[in-house]
């Protein structure tokens, strides 16, 4: 059928509705993430888009509050009320839960035909394609091993795209793209290579998970777009966040970035010296730079972090105390949160410290005794345990209830019982 003159798509990702970092101003930050979400919806309505695409982490956590769920549903309903025929295409991100416990289930319902979740069936090898003759869209819900999953499913994905008459074939991911990721030390199994992208047979790949945007980029014959987040999830992130408007016609793809005006201005000041300095030097340097930034952003609500690096001759905590007193007196500015990251050290002989390993590198080592497919399930269970401990552990003991532990134990038993049977069968 081909596409009409122009197909317009609103693209956003990593909206993290419900995010409350830092906890000291958690409610204020929740509002900031909602405001950012609403600005994106406003932009899609203003541009009269034909489709909206979201590439994962709609919510901050699977166990979002009822208020967060209602907010998202009402905003999507507002979009649909203004754009009658719009379709919302979305995949699950790691913060949205798992296949079995998916936060997106709280948004979709039988009457919301406009809200289409993709990528879950693809994970288990079943065909799943949105194709209205204008665009064909597939996706992959979040998995800790996206490269492996794409290798396994690329023939199915490629066949569905090849059989489609749509002019544009779009694939949605929640992972990292080789050469485009801004995150250091990402495990290899979480990175998608150009060779794998080519096997998808898509015109366009849109990828969430990375919070810093990357403009439209071409690898071989496939365009890549990383929309980034709509609001800063980490206080160290001062990059501009927003959404994209894609225009597709028979000749080209254009992607226009629209910045979102944040509710809070996040500022980071790094005060450091390669040479040994006294307490007064660090205090004076920090005060001067803090005042300059406060004056330059006097009309905004400010979140301020000061990072102190270097060698100090004296007491590093006296520097911190003096800066806290100084900030307390800056009442004419709307400073809603202040944080000091004190990395100052007294001079000492250098000691080589080995790099700390992360769960992403440790888990594959721990579970290497298992067959590869069991390793993936073991990592999933471990991630589930971490999430459950964070969300529902007893405040007194720090443990889960017996009922919750029993469910997890049954999952562990399945893995090891199956592995033992397979081992005996091979003997």
Image (tube, rainbow, N blue to C red):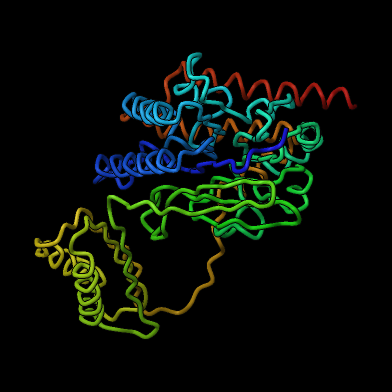
The answer to whether 72 is drawn above or below residue 253 in the figure is: above
Q: Is residue 159 left or right of residue 81?
A: right
The answer to whether 403 is drawn above or below residue 33 in the figure is: above
- Residue, x 80% and y 21% (percent of image)? 421
Location of residue 296 by image quarter: bottom left
Q: Where is residue 36 shown, x and y percent of the image?
A: 35, 44
Q: Nearer the viewer, residue 329 or 302?
A: 302
Q: Quadrant of the N terminus?
A: top right
- Residue, x 54% and y 71% (percent of image)? 352
In the rendered image, the residue lying farthest to the bottom is 275
**How many circles with numbers are drawn on the protein?**
0
The answer to whether 87 is drawn above or below residue 308 in the figure is: above
Q: Where is residue 14 shown, x and y percent of the image?
A: 47, 43
Say if residue 159 shows up in the picture.
yes
Q: Nearer the viewer, residue 357 or 282?
A: 282
The answer to whether 3 is drawn above or below residue 272 in the figure is: above
Location of residue 287 by image quarter: bottom left
Q: Is residue 361 left or right of residue 67?
A: right
Q: Where is residue 7 shown, x and y percent of the image?
A: 59, 41
Location of residue 131 by image quarter: top right
Q: Nearer the viewer, residue 94 or 42?
A: 42
Q: Where is residue 427 shown, x and y percent of the image?
A: 90, 27
């Amino acid at each position: 059928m081909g596409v009409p003159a122009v197909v317009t798509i609103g693209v956003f990702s990593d909206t993290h509705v419900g995010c409350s970092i830092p906890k000291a101003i958690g409610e204020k930050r929740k509002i900031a993430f909602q405001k950012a979400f609403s600005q994106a919806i406003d932009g899609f309505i203003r541009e009269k888009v034909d489709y909206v695409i979201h590439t994962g982490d709609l919510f901050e956590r699977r166990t979002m509050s009822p208020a967060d769920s209602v907010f998202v549903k009402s905003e999507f309903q507002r979009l649909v009320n203004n754009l009658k025929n719009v379709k919302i295409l979305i995949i699950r991100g790691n913060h949205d839960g798992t296949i079995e416990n998916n936060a997106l289930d709280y948004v979709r319902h039988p009457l919301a035909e406009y809200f289409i979740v993709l990528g879950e069936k693809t994970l288990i090898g079943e065909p799943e394609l949105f194709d209205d003759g204008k665009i064909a869209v597939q996706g992959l819900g979040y998995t800790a091993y996206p490269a492996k999953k794409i290798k396994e499913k690329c023939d199915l994905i490629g066949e569905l795209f090849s059989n489609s008459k749509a002019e544009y074939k779009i694939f949605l991911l929640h992972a990292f793209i080789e050469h485009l990721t801004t995150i250091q030390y990402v495990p290899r199994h979480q990175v998608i290579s150009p060779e794998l992208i080519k096997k998808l047979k898509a015109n366009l790949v849109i990828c969430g998970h990375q919070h810093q945007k990357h403009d439209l980029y071409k690898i071989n014959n496939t365009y890549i777009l990383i929309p980034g987040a709509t609001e800063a999830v980490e206080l160290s992130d001062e990059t501009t966040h927003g959404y994209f408007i894609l225009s597709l016609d028979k000749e080209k793809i254009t992607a226009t970035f629209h910045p979102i005006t944040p509710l809070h201005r996040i500022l980071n000041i790094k005060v450091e010296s390669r040479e040994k300095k006294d307490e007064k030097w660090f205090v004076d340097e920090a005060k001067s730079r803090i005042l300059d930034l406060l004056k330059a952003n006097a009309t905004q609500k400010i979140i301020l972090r000061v990072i102190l690096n270097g060698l100090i001759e004296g007491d590093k905590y006296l520097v911190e105390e003096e800066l806290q007193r100084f900030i307390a007196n800056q009442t004419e500015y709307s400073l809603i949160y202040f944080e000091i990251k004190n990395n100052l050290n007294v001079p000492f002989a250098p000691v080589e410290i080995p790099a700390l390993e992360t769960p992403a590198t440790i888990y594959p080592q721990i579970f290497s005794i298992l067959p590869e497919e069991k390793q993936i399930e073991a990592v999933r269970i471990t991630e589930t345990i971490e999430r459950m401990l964070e969300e529902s552990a007893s405040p007194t003991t720090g443990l889960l209830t017996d009922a919750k532990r029993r469910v997890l134990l049954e999952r562990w038993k399945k893995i090891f019982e199956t592995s033992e049977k397979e081992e005996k069968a091979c003997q």
